[in-house]
Image (tube, grey):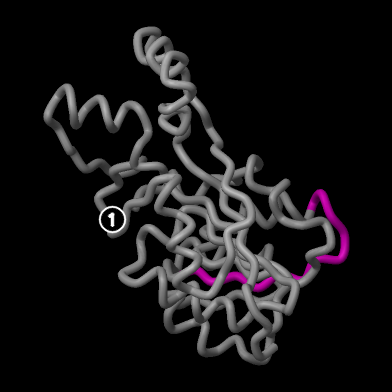
């Protein structure tokens, strides 16, 4: 992945972290800029970070109270002493995993009874991607963005609930962020079809999911 990922602070995601969440886990935390912003806004946060890449992990260690430098699949095994967490954050991480369903299920076991997962995921129905595929016949991977060459999984607004449900989590919020303008012809068609293409404006969706039933703390 490019350095763009490690340098993002994602301020548009911070409001989705519940105000009462004080024990946080962030997977794929990069250089820690998201958590640094959250800590600057809120007092009393204890945060654990997971980051597999050494250079980014070294910088993130200055932000987190504990930093585990390892892939998330391996790191979760070492965090039983830190659980339960009020909130687990995953900013543009789940789409890079071989089995995000299994990872979410394991994350659910680390949540407090009223805890939640806050996850940002790219929208494969983003209009520029659809335009390139259907009108241009192109599906070109890139170094970053919707078709990042390291993305293993792809999701739409309608498929996201299943991602969390299969992990024993209930999706309670799914809001589009980083919206762009639709071309005028598509915008007109969207109005004629009562917003059928509203979701194609968004680069990402921010999801908030809670445990559907109590589990071990």
Q: Secondary structure at mark 1?
A: loop
Residue 152 in the image: x percent, y percent? 28, 59
Magenta residue check for 47: yes
Q: Quadrant of residue 217?
A: bottom right
Rendered view: 204 above or below 131: below
Q: Quadrant of residue 197?
A: top left
Rendered view: 162 above or below 81: above
Residue 145 in the image: x percent, y percent? 36, 40
**Going 84% across and 62% down the picture, which residue do you hit?**
20
Magenta residue check for 14: no
Q: Which residue appears farthest toward the front when viewing the image?
A: 193
**Going 46% across and 33% down the picture, which residue do you hit?**
199
Give the number of callouts.
1
**Front residue (pair 64, 210):** 210
Residue 122 in the image: x percent, y percent? 42, 45
**Going 63% across and 46% down the picture, which residue do you hit?**
13
Q: Quadrant of residue 78?
A: bottom right
Q: Which residue appears farthest toward the right when viewing the image?
A: 43
Q: Which residue is mark 1?
A: 150
Which portion, as a residue range, is magenta? 40-51
Residue 113 in the image: x percent, y percent? 73, 79
Q: Which residue appears farthest toward the left when viewing the image?
A: 137
Rendered view: 145 above or below 34: above
**Front residue (pair 160, 27):** 160
Number of other residues with Cα within 10 Å of mark 1, as a class: few under 14, some 14 to 19, many 20 or more: some
Q: Is residue 186 left or right of residue 139?
A: right
């Amino acid at each position: 992945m490019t350095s763009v990922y490690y340098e993002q602070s994602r301020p548009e995601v911070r409001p989705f972290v519940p105000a009462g969440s004080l024990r946080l886990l962030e997977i794929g935390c990069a250089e820690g800029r998201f958590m640094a912003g959250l800590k600057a806004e809120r007092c009393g946060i204890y945060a654990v970070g997971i980051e597999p890449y050494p250079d980014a992990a070294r910088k993130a260690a200055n932000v987190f109270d504990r930093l585990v430098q390892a892939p998330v699949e391996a790191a979760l095994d070492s965090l039983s002493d830190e659980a339960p967490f009020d909130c687990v954050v995953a900013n543009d991480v789940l789409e890079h995993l071989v089995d995000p369903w299994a990872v979410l299920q394991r994350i659910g076991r680390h949540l407090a009874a009223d805890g939640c997962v806050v996850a940002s995921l790219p929208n494969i129905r983003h209009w520029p991607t659809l335009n390139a595929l259907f009108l241009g016949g192109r599906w070109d991977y890139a170094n970053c963005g919707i078709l990042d060459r390291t993305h293993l999984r792809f999701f739409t607004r309608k498929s996201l609930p299943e991602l969390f449900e299969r992990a024993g989590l209930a999706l309670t919020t799914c809001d589009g962020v980083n919206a762009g303008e639709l071309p005028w012809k598509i915008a007109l068609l969207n109005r004629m079809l009562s917003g059928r293409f509203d979701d194609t404006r968004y680069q990402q969706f921010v999801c908030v999911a809670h445990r559907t039933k109590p589990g071990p703390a």
